[in-house]
Amino acid sequence: MIEVKADTIVKHFKNQKIEITRKVLEIRKSEILPFLNKEEFNSHCRNACPNHNSKWTCPPNCPNFVDYSKSYSKIQLFLFVTSTKQFDFLPQEECSLEAYNFTKEELQNYLRINEPLDGKIIAANSCEICATCSIIKGKPCYFPDKMRYNLVAFGFNVGKILTDLFQHELKWSTENIIPEYVSSVGAILKK
C-alpha cells in the first residue's frame, strides 16, 4: 500500500493567512507509468491549450517521459490543496482563479527549493521563465538547464493519479460555481 504523508503549511496572500494541505508520496518510477498516455492527453493540449507548440516545455516539444526519466528510479509526487473559502475576501469572479494560481505558485516554489542535486523536478505548470518562449522566435531555449516539464505535458492522466494514488478528487470551477477547493500537483524524480 502506498503511504501518503500529509501536513498543513501556512502562507500569506494579500495579508491573509492561507492554509495549504500538502500531501506527499513516493513510488517507484515504474508505478507511475500506467498513468501515462501521451497520445490521448497531448491531444487535449493540442485542442484546447494556447501553450501547445508555443513553449519548449509543452507538446509536441516535450520529450518522451521514459527517455527523459531513464536515470531515475523513483518519483515523489506532491499535491497541494487549498480551500477556496479562504479567498472569500476577493470578488467571487476572481476567487477560484486566484486560489488556483496561488496554490500552483506555492507548489512550484516548493519544488524549486527542494529539487535535489541528483534529481529533477516535474513542474506544477508550464514553463514561465521567459515572458515569451524562444520557440516563438525559432530559437533554442535560452535556459535549458532551468526549464522543467510538467506531468500533463508528458501525457500523464493527472486526474487518475490523484484519485488512484492520493484518493483525491479533482474539482473544476464553472462560470457560476466556485469549487470547494483547488489542487495542484508536481513531482521530483529521484535516483
Image: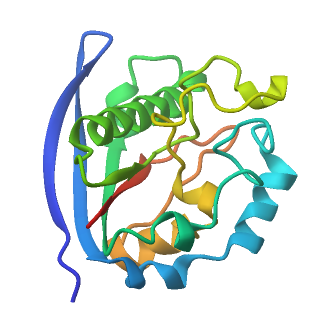
- Viewer-side residue, 158 vs 82: 158
Which residue lies at the image location 52% right of the left edge and 17% below the top edge? 91
Give the vertical position of 122 relative to 163 (above or below).
Answer: above
- Viewer-side residue, 17 vs 180: 17
Which residue lies at the image location 76% right of the left edge and 72% below the top edge? 39
Give the vertical position of 89 relative to 24 (above or below).
Answer: above
Q: Position of residue 175 (x, y in %)?
A: 70, 38
Give the vertical position of 186 relative to 2 (above or below).
Answer: above
What quarter of the picture does the N terminus occupy? Answer: bottom left
Q: How many marks?
A: 0
Give the vertical position of 91 relative to 56 (above or below).
Answer: above
Q: Position of residue 186 (x, y in %)?
A: 40, 52
Q: Position of residue 73 (x, y in %)?
A: 31, 75
89 sits left or right of 2 in the view: right
Q: Quadrant of residue 5?
A: bottom left
Q: Position of residue 72 (x, y in %)?
A: 34, 69
Which residue lies at the image location 33% right of the left edge and 55% below the top edge? 79
